[in-house]
Amino acid sequence: MEFFDVFDVLGTIAFAISGALMAIKREMDVFGIFIVAFATALGGGILRDVFIGNTPVWWMGHFYVVHFISVSVLLAILFRNKIYFLTRSLFIFDTIGLAIFTISGVKIGVSANLDPAVSVILGIMTGCFGGVIRDILCNEIPIIFRKEIYALASLAGAVCFIILYSLNFDNNISYISTIALVVVIRVLAVKFMISLPTYTIKKK
């Protein structure tokens, strides 16, 4: 397993736990929990690979991630009563997954010699769309369509990674800096209730 694959596995585990916790919160059965966890962990990467014609998609050539997802889901189920702050735990794992998968998407775009703007879009897609699928399956409005800062955190992380990569910074510094930026933006946005404006149609 290469170093870059380690980051993908970490992101996959984080999103799998995020999906499992959301499904548990919605009182789904075991099958539902596994489906939501798999969709959350793999959905963004699948869309990314399909868009750039990278088939078979990444996880099919790295089937060990399925084992990591399965173990993560089992642990989330077994220790669900030990997680005292379910909402907070969901936020933490979701944010970590967002950061790592954003890097993953950008990295793949850059490696394919795509335009930097396209690579940024792939990063956002990889980071955000697993959560979109999770929320839809759990009958919730996807978080990126609400006023909470989410996609913008992914965008900031993607741009940060592109800049550091173009300046030939060490990969470890680029990874850590990008993850830190995404996490800080998400934490500050939630802590200080920073959000994008929303609009409604006034009834006459």
Image (tube, rainbow, N blue to C red):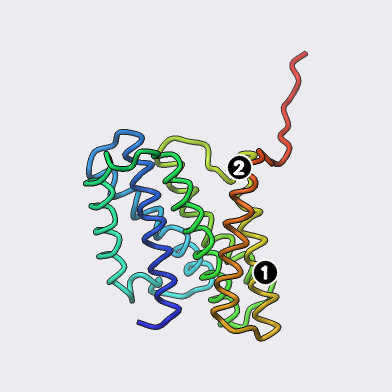
Q: Nearer the viewer, residue 156 or 202?
A: 156
Residue 162, image x, y percentages? 66, 74
Percent from the top left, x then y, of residue 188? 64, 48
The CA distance from mark 1 to mark 2 is 21 Å
Image quadrant assignment for residue 159: bottom right
The percent position of residue 9, horizontal first and vertical second, equals 38, 69
| Residue on which disc 1 sits | 160
Residue 16: percent from left, percent from top: 36, 55
Amino acid beneath label 1: Cys
- Residue type at the position of mark 2: Val
- Quadrant in which the C terminus appears: top right
Q: Is residue 141 left or right of residue 64?
A: right
**Vertical comparison of 102 with 139: above or below:** below
Q: Residue at x 70, y 83 (%)?
A: 167
Which residue is more in the foreground, 194 or 139? 194
Residue plotted at (65% across, 60% down):
155
